[in-house]
Amino acid sequence: MLSVQGLESGYGRARVLFGISLSVEPGELVCVMGRNGVGKTTLLDTVMGVLPATAGMVAFAGEDVTRLPSHRRVALGMAYVPQGHATFPQLSVLGNLLVTLEACRGPREALEEALETFPRLKPLLKRSAGFLSGGQQQQLAIARALVTRPRLLILDEPTEGIQPSIVIEIEEAIERLHASGMAVLLVEQYLELALRLADRFLILDAGHVVHSGTAADLRQEETRRLLAV
Ligand SMILES: Nc1ncnc2c1ncn2[C@@H]1O[C@H](COP(=O)(O)OP(=O)(O)OP(=O)(O)O)[C@@H](O)[C@H]1O
């Protein structure tokens, strides 16, 4: 479904990613791990077209999307929730969802479905997003992505800095989406959560994939050293 081959990108003359290859099959949950600053966010930004690739290829559902702008990738079924729960703080919860629904010209049911994933948002529809807790904003950010009815959901550290009760709700929501057949590419630093959720792992170090495998592989010493846990 998602195929990344030899991907390179960076900022100006600073190269951050060096020949990254990975795949996410339909319905699979792949977790990208690695210490701070190794290039995880840069990888997701490049996969989604927020940052241009300087070499390599990103293909989605059999189509080369490497040069497509992000909104075209969304139209093909990719959705991205960047780090730091990006919402429009001055808009209401409903307004945030409607902006996305209108942008993707989706049906109203898509909005209802997204709210079913996070029922905690239902009584808050009229509240300004800026007044939500960090955890509620993260739920809203994921709900906005779901409004586009993606086939691949890309999440950058969705539980970072969020109160434990909502971390559990977010984990359960990701689990349900995965169980329903959605493919997920997840950056997650919290090892235990990643072990519970992921089918496969990639570990990045200094912009390279240095390890990949299943949960059983991830428990080994070498892996723990790479993650410094
Ligand atoms: N906008 C930017 N301009 C220049 N350099 C950047 C920019 N964003 C990130 N970098 C650099 O690129 C490298 C990779 O950063 P990136 O955010 O992709 O890492 P990360 O693995 O996601 O880390 P974290 O877990 O801290 O978010 C780092 O050296 C970082 O300083």
Image (spheres, grey):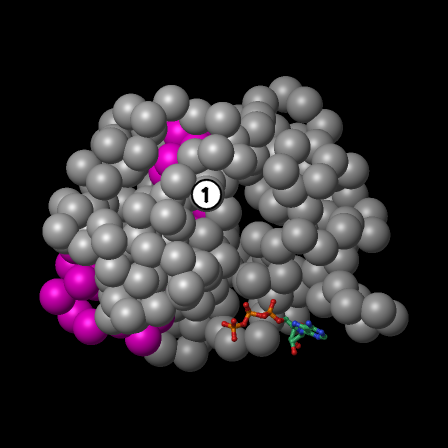
Figure quadrant of the C terminus: bottom left
Name the residue rendered at 35%, 68% in the picture.
130
Q: Position of residue 218 (x, y in %)?
A: 36, 58
Residue at 13 percent across and 51 percent down: it is 123
Let me know if residue 221 appears in the view: no
Q: Quadrant of residue 75?
A: top right
Count of labels in the image: 1
Q: Is residue 101 magenta?
A: no
Per the image, label 1 sits on a secondary structure element best described as helix
Using the image, determine if residue 54 lies above or below residue 222: above
- The image position of residue 175, as x and y in percent, is 23, 42
Q: Residues within 10 Å of mark 1 (few under 14, many from 20)?
A: some
Range shown magenta = 146-170
Question: What residue is drawn where x is 31% and y is 34%?
Answer: 111
Residue at image x 26%, y 67%?
Answer: 132
> Amino acid type of disc 1?
Val
Q: List the residue tagged with mark 1.
A: 99
Q: Quadrant of residue 110?
A: top left
Mark 1 within 8 Å of ligand 1, using the beta carbon: no
Residue 39 % position (x, y): 61, 66
User: Which is more toward the observer, 99 or 39?
Assistant: 99
- Ligand 1 quarter of the rendering: bottom right
Apparent side of residue 148 relative to residue 37 in the rendered image (left or right): left
Can see residue 224? yes
Relative image position of residue 172 (x, y in whole percent): 18, 48
